[in-house]
Image (cartoon, rainbow, N blue to C red):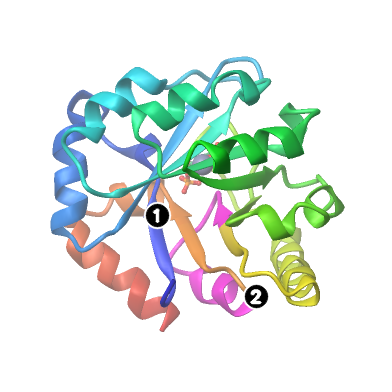
Amino acid sequence: MAGILLSPSLLSADFSCLAGELAALEEAGVTWAHWDVMDGMFVPNITMGPAVIAACRKKSKLFFDVHLMIERPGRFIEQFVDAGADLICVHAETEPHLERTVSEIARLGARPAVALNPHTPLAMVEYLLPQLYMVLIMSVNPGFGGQKFIPFCLDKTRRLKKMITAKGTETLAEIDGGVTLENAASLVAAGADILVSGSAFFAFPPYGERHEAFMTAVS
Ligand code: DX5
Ligand code: ZN
């Protein structure tokens, strides 16, 4: 992957016209779209499931970066792959058989990723790094958009990057939660390859200019 990417979180998009929002993102030069799937169990909120992603898949060529905030995601991998997810990210805290689930994602043809809650140690993913396309560092407690970045996640990003270098893998680092134009540069300096942004992106149309502003902030 060349350069830093922005993956706008659709959690802050207009849910009444997701296809239109996806088209506007493509028009804006964005290449990834971040889907926040929530089950009301792992996190105290409910959003969308595979049926909504499948319907939108028919309308968009964007790379679908699917972040599952659901209990025992291993039960649903096939459904999300069939729905058109390009990448599936499961939380380490939700799946006791994480290696099995990561292998399953890859076997079914999607890119495997693991997310860690802010307090969850990096050691949870250390042995899986050779199998992981990406590690997602949650920099807020998952469940809602518009929260403040938790400062210790900057150091955690640096340590993740060191761990990846030490293991010699190509694993990418994605940061999700409280990302703004103001902290974007420091996150990239710490080693982030992909920045997720919900409220700091969708509340500031036109999307093309906002995307450009993020790219300039990290260049
Ligand atoms: C939080 C989600 C995030 C969220 C980010 O549970 O995983 O993707 O939408 O939103 P902001 O950028 O507003 O913190
Ligand atoms: Zn997310």
Report the magenta residues as a range.
175-190
| In the foreground, 97 or 115 | 97
Location of residue 52 with respect to 29 vertically, above or below: above
- The CA span between labels 2 and 1 is 18 Å
Residue behind mark 2: 190
Q: Position of residue 185 (x, y in %)?
A: 51, 76
Residue 65 % position (x, y): 43, 45
Q: Is residue 213 above or below residue 12?
A: below
The kind of residue tagged 1 is Ser
Instruction: Decide which of tag 2 and tag 1 comes sooner along the chain.
Output: 1
Q: Is residue 182 magenta?
A: yes
Q: Is residue 169 left or right of residue 206?
A: right
Does any atom of ligand 1 lie closer than 8 Å to the CB of label 2?
A: no
Residue located 39% across and 61% down the image: 6
Q: Nearer the viewer, residue 146 or 212?
A: 212
Residue 128 x %, y %? 76, 52
- Residue 181 counted in the magenta span: yes
Judged left or right of residue 143, residue 91 is right
Q: Residue at x 21, y 52 (%)?
A: 25
Quadrant position of residue 56: top left
Question: Which element carries disc 1, helix, strand or loop?
Answer: strand
Quadrant of residue 39 within the rendered picture: top right
Horizontal side of residue 185 vs 122, given as left or right: left
Q: Which residue is situated farthest in the front direction here? A: 107
Q: Which mark is residue 7?
A: 1
